[in-house]
Image: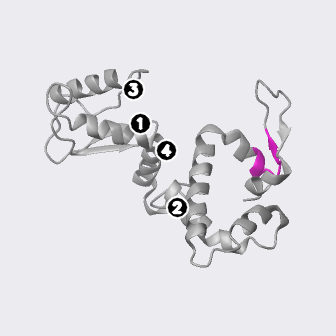
Amino acid sequence: MLQPGFAVIHSNELETLRDLLVSWMKENPLSPLESEDILVQSNGIAQWLKMALAETGDKGMGIAAGLRVELPNQFIWRLYRAVLGNEVPVSLPYDKPNLRWRLLRMLPTLGSNSDFEPITRYLADDHDGRKTWHLAERLADLFDQYQVYRADWLNAWSNNNDVLPHTEKQPGGRVVPTDQLWQPAL
């Protein structure tokens, strides 16, 4: 009997990881009402993995049920809630879906700040709210990606430092272009 635990398995070949996971799950089945927690690096990989595990034959399990495939930050947030209870909100405040709704509420109110002029100009003829919804969706995706790949930008911007921190190509960093100042302001 396999004891509950935590295993970190990594590879740059998804198929190899899938094959190992299928082998592991076949050799160590959980009881019918238990769920397997699997952490992945992106939502796209989560979808691919669920479909790959549901394949029939040697490559899959034939069915993908009782799986909780999630991103590491979602898993950690769930652990916080398990330990701290209702003191911690149900979902992360900056998860993409939550961010989308926050932006949807915020976008119509940005008109007075000159930094947001490109946004207000874009939304000027949005009479039915479709452009606002689409923009909120795109911005939530953008800022979600920034959380993963450009956390240094978000950190600088949250400290009222409107710069793009240094990279190998730009060791000293650079100032955010004028037409993009709405991003740090937002």
Figure quadrant of the N terminus: top left
Task: Tell whether position 122 is magenta.
Answer: no
Label 3 amino acid?
Val
Kindly identify which numbered label has been placed on residue 40: 1
| Earlier sequence position, callout 1 versus callout 3 | 3
Between marks 4 and 2 in the image, the one whose residue lies nearer the viewer? 2
Whether residue 122 is situated above or below residue 50 in the rendered picture: below
State the residue in front, 186 or 119.
Answer: 119
Tag 2–tag 1 contact (CB < 8 Å): no
| Earlier sequence position, callout 2 versus callout 3 | 3
Whether residue 134 is situated above or below residue 129 in the rendered picture: above
Direction bottom: furthest residue = 127
How crowded pointer 1 is (Cα within 10 Å; few <14, some 14-19, many 20+) is rated as: some
Read off the magenta span.
156-164
Kindly identify which numbered label has been placed on residue 73: 4
Instruction: Judge from the rendering whether residue 127 lies leftward or rightward of residue 71; answer left or right.
Output: right
- Residue at 73% across / 54% down in the picture? 183
Tag 1–tag 3 contact (CB < 8 Å): no
Between marks 1 and 4 in the image, the one whose residue lies nearer the viewer? 1
SS for callout 1: loop
Q: Calculate the distance from the C-alpha at mark 2 to the C-alpha at mark 1.
A: 20 Å
Label 2 amino acid?
Asn
Between marks 2 and 3 in the image, the one whose residue lies nearer the viewer? 2
Label 1 amino acid?
Val
SS for callout 3: loop
| Residue indicated by mark 3 | 8
Label 4 amino acid?
Asn
Q: Calculate the distance from the C-alpha at mark 2 to the C-alpha at mark 3.
A: 29 Å
